[in-house]
Image (cartoon, grey):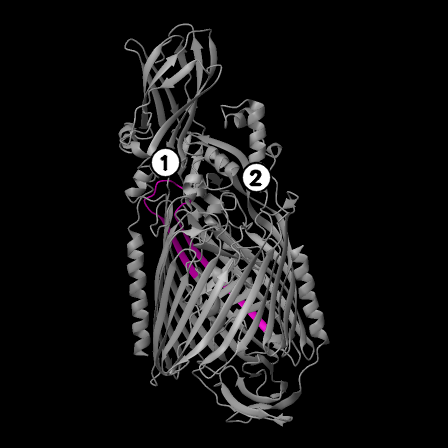
């Protein structure tokens, strides 16, 4: 009901916005030309900083832009030219010609065109969101994933507070690509409790591209792409830096981060950045969540060189974290699972445990080292060239509570080391006729080592991947068309453990598999009125089956669930179509996107019954493939009816279905609406931008869940009765049915509130930014459907967060 | 350009160092530690020894465990103990002492059901250093009466907080032995 009220609220905003009139606007027009030849530059962007309004030039370099009266900072940019900023005072229609100097150095990054600079309306044929440094500073979470949770279409698959996997349009893990400093982040991302190993403080810009993007990003970019970029060097000269302090009351967490950077006029620059975080146990509204403490120590070094031939950037980063896993969700076997589910809450003794920063068992130790070396240059006249070389080393150790004697000896249950080297080369060519575009090749080599560990889950493997793509674009006055094509191959050598029937035991074998796919995409965006555009995109995406889907054979870390891979899995392919409607005006910004994603060979975990060992019974699952579809809607609305008031809303709706099994897909995020009112309070000489925000997130109960019935799994009743030898067979079956039902049902919907206040205070030569925010303001009890602890404990209660940010040095 | 070369050199160094670190790989040596394939119940009364094993040589997955039946003579009392073994090794290794050393965080639990309920009584469990029940050694008594059958379930609970009354535990072992109560003693093995 409350959700309904929100929708009405959002819709009424939308309709009233349509009725409101534009403020007094004037026309800014002129030409953007090459300073040396005076030739018009086609496709250059001209936009008003701060307003996020702009346009691109026509064939002859001309442009025209409507802007409100007053002072503006106009910026013009074009590939291979130095950007130019001009201050203007717009009182009537005005002509402004801009001459740009060719700049061999400035070979811009080749990315999806996500610069806010470019006209938002024609920016992309796909749905796109950008979190700027300011957004990130205000919402930086306890984890990288949590920083993104307010974006439309994003949910979090959480294993407690410390582990949050971003879910984009219902897909996560191996089905989204996370780019970190230009490299595809390669960890053990197949695991539901394996979060991206990225320091939330390291990113200064995060871009979210929704929908399939395999053509540019290769395998895995099925649900979308998250790009995390460190702050670019050379934004200003001289020595400067920033210090961040974040305090989280709920788990008495302190996080400190800072950087110093220096750009020299000689064209050399560096940045040294570090973060430290220590968190104790979290609290749900009524009880402590035992053993949820975590700590993180991360750092990065960035070196940059700017010369006539181009730029070179070296980025080295290390992320290291130790994470406690909620003790109440750790399970030995089915009997433990049954007890925990039937209780539904942590055991009383566990609820009364005292708060600690100590991390006990179970726990994870994760370290991720990343080195990226990026070159950007324009060697010849035909375009801008970029070369990214990367090396990543991911180490993951997971310690079980089961045999603490062994864990004390330092032997983990899971001990994996994944090394990835990659090389990507891209050329963004100068216009050829009406075409501008990019061609690229990428290669990567991977090595996964299984260290000394207690149990087998996935094998060691080597893999080699290659890919090549071309993507061309035809920019037009009020439209843009693009199309792309890509080929990828991945060769895998693995040494899995299999059960040999002839000798009746498990043996290791060597196996080679080749996965390959051709993907294509096409898109169009059309600006059909001054402030509206519509984009349409069709695309295919793919991914090879991940290592656990092929070869898993074991009980996964404390989940009490036995997973078996299928060596014969094929590649998973997706065929997606999405349409995006955008409005961009001074008072109203809107992006609404509908999508349909059809899968062939969708890989999922299928329950297969119970298996028995000396440890007892385990629910067994096997990886299987079928046709599936996902469809949904995500929208972002920003409406500023008055100078002092801004209303933001995001809505995400997703439906997923397994077409072969004729049932809903599991773990599809619940419908979610977030609305927030931002009130700009006042401004004085020493206090700038003092604001207050009140917001709410409403999530509807997920009713579309796959139901596993006893009858759907072939197993004798006698076996089920063996689960509970103390009960009669009829009682045991009834109890088993009840447990299956509890396992699949989603928790009720919820509404949680937040209150935020912030201000920038001038202090001498610098300005201190302070934000205080209360999440889950009313300490509501709730459980999100995507919380992996939803069967055992509530999600966290009220969390009051204080953020202080202090820049220093030359600005 | 020279800086560029040194960039590349440092990258190569970092890469090769890291590769060297993981290059000296370990063999798959899982199950070398802490693996228990076998739980054996041994009952003696001075003249008779009764043994029954639950064995799962291939660990989780593969085949289900093989469990012996316990043939128990009515009207007799035994002192019992539990042996834990890793029989996937040659020769088999005992894990009994490893768990005994961790007596403070472990507890064997016995539950009797079916026709054996009320006929098989497990008592006098040995204690850990804090006086809490451990149960690796115990007394087992079979009351007199007609022949019947049922089961004896033996679980090994791992209470990592050390407080066995808190109810916070994982199950390390869960084995259910079929029990056949006969009129007279039948010594197995």
Measured from the top left, where is residue A206 in percent x and y? 49, 68
- For the N terminus of chain B, the image quarter is bottom left
Residue identified by numbered label 1: B159
Residue A403 lies in what quarter of the image? top left
Query: Is A569 on the left-hand or right-hand side of A530?
Result: left
Give above or below for A579 relative to A399: below
Query: Is A252 on the left-hand or right-hand side of B91?
Result: right
Q: 10 Å neighbourhood of mark 2: few (<14), some, or many (≥20)?
A: some
Measured from the top left, where is residue A537 in percent x and y? 64, 66
Does the residue at mark 2 contact the one at mark 1 (Cβ under 8 Å)? no
| Magenta region | A444-472
Measured from the top left, where is residue A524 in percent x and y? 65, 71
- The chief SS type of the magenta part is strand
- For the C terminus of chain B, the image quarter is top left
Residue B181 lies in what quarter of the image? top left
Residue identified by numbered label 2: A742
Which type of secondary structure does the marked residue at label 1 adopt? loop
Do tags 2 and 1 sit on the same chain? no
């Amino acid at each position: 009901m409350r959700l309904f009220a929100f929708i009405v609220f959002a819709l009424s905003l939308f309709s009233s916005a349509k009725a409101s009139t534009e403020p007094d606007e004037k026309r800014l027009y002129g030409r953007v030309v090459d300073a040396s030849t005076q030739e018009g530059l086609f496709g250059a962007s001209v936009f008003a900083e701060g307003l996020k309004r702009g346009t691109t030039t026509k064939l002859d370099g001309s442009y025209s832009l409507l802007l409100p009266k007053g002072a503006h900072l106009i910026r013009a940019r074009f590939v291979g030219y130095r950007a130019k900023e001009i201050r203007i005072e717009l009182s009537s229609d005005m002509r402004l010609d801009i001459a740009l100097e060719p700049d061999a150095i400035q070979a811009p990054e080749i990315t999806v065109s996500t610069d806010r600079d470019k006209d938002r309306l024609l920016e992309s044929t796909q749905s796109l969101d950008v979190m700027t440094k300011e957004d990130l500073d205000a919402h930086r979470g306890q984890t990288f994933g949590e920083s993104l949770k307010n974006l439309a279409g994003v949910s979090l698959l959480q294993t407690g507070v410390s582990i949050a996997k971003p879910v984009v349009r219902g897909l996560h893990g191996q089905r989204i690509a996370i780019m970190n400093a230009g490299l595809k982040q390669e960890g053990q991302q197949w695991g539901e409790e394996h979060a991206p190993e990225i320091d939330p403080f390291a990113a200064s810009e995060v871009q979210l591209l929704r929908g399939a993007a395999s053509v540019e990003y290769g395998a895995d970019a099925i649900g979308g792409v998250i790009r995390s970029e460190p702050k670019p060097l050379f934004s200003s000269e001289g020595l400067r830096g920033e210090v961040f302090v974040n305090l989280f009351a709920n788990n008495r967490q302190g996080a400190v981060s800072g950087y110093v950077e220096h750009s020299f006029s000689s064209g050399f620059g560096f940045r040294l950045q570090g973060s430290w975080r220590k968190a104790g146990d979290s609290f749900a509204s009524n009880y402590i969540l035992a053993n949820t403490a975590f700590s993180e120590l991360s750092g990065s070094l960035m070196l940059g060189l700017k010369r006539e031939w181009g730029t070179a950037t070296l980025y080295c980063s290390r992320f290291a974290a130790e994470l406690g896993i909620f003790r109440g969700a750790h399970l030995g076997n089915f009997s433990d699972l049954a007890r925990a589910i039937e209780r539904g809450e942590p055991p009383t003794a566990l609820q009364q445990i005292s708060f600690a920063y100590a991390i006990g068992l179970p726990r994870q130790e994760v370290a991720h080292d990343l080195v990226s070396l990026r070159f950007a240059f324009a060697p010849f006249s035909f375009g801008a060239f970029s070369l990214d070389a990367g090396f990543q080393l991911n180490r993951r150790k997971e310690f079980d509570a089961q045999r603490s004697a062994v864990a004390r000896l330092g032997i983990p249950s899971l001990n994996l080391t994944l090394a990835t080297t990659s090389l990507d080369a891209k050329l963004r060519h100068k216009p050829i006729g009406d075409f501008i575009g990019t061609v690229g090749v990428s290669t990567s080599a991977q090595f996964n080592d299984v260290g000394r560990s207690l149990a087998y889950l996935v094998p060691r493997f080597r893999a080699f991947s290659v890919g090549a793509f071309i993507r061309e674009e035809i920019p037009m006055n009020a439209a843009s068309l693009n199309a792309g094509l890509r080929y990828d191959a991945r060769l895998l050598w693995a040494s899995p453990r299999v059960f040999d029937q002839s000798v009746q035991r498990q043996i290791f074998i060597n196996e080679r598999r080749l996965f390959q796919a051709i993907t294509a995409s096409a898109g169009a965006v059309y600006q059909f009125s001054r402030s509206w555009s519509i984009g349409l995109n069709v695309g295919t995406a793919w991914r090879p089956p991940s290592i656990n889907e092929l070869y898993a054979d074991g009980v996964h870390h404390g989940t009490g669930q036995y997973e078996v891979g299928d060596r014969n899995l094929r590649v998973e392919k997706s065929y997606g179509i999405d349409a995006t409607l955008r409005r961009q005006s001074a008072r109203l910004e809107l992006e609404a996107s509908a999508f349909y994603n059809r899968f062939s060979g969708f890989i999922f975990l299928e329950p297969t019954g119970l298996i028995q060992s000396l440890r007892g019974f385990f629910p067994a699952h096997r990886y299987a493939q079928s046709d599936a579809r996902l469809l949904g809607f995500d929208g972002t609305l920003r409406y500023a009816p008055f100078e002092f008031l801004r209303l933001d809303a995001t809505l995400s709706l997703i439906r997923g279905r397994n077409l072969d099994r004729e049932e809903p897909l599991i773990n599809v995020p619940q419908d979610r609406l977030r609305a927030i009112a931002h009130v700009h309070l006042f401004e004085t000489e020493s206090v700038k931008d003092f604001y207050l925000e009140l917001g709410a997130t409403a999530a509807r109960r997920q009713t579309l869940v796959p139901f596993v019935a006893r009858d759907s799994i072939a197993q004798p009743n006698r076996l089920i009765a063996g689960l509970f030898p103390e009960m009669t067979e009829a009682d045991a079956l009834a109890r088993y049915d009840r447990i299956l039902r509890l396992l699949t049902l989603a928790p009720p919907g919820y509404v949680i509130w937040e209150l935020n206040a912030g201000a920038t205070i001038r202090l001498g030569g610098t300005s201190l930014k302070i934000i205080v925010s209360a999440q889950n303001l009313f300490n509501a009890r709730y459980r999100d459907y995507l919380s992996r602890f939803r069967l055992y404990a509530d999600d966290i209660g009220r969390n009051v967060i204080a953020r202080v940010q202090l820049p220093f040095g030359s600005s | 350009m020279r800086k560029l070369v040194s960039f590349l050199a440092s990258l190569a160094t970092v890469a090769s160092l890291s590769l060297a670190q993981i290059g000296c790989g370990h063999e798959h040596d899982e199950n070398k530690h802490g693996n228990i394939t076998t739980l054996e119940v041994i009952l003696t009364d001075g003249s008779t020894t009764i043994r029954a094993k639950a064995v799962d040589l291939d660990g989780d997955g593969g085949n289900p465990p093989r469990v012996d039946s316990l043939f128990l003579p009515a009207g007799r009392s035994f002192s019992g103990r539990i042996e834990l073994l890793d029989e996937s090794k040659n020769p088999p290794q005992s894990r009994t002492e490893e768990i005994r050393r961790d007596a403070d965080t472990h507890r064997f639990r016995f539950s009797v059901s079916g026709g054996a309920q009320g006929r098989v009584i497990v008592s006098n469990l040995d204690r850990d250093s804090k006086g809490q029940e451990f149960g690796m050694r115990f007394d087992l008594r079979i009351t007199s009466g007609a022949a019947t059958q049922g089961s004896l379930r033996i679980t090994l609970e791992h209470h990592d907080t050390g407080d066995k009354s808190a109810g916070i535990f994982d199950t390390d072992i869960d084995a259910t032995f079929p029990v056949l109560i006969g009129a007279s003693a039948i010594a197995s093995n």
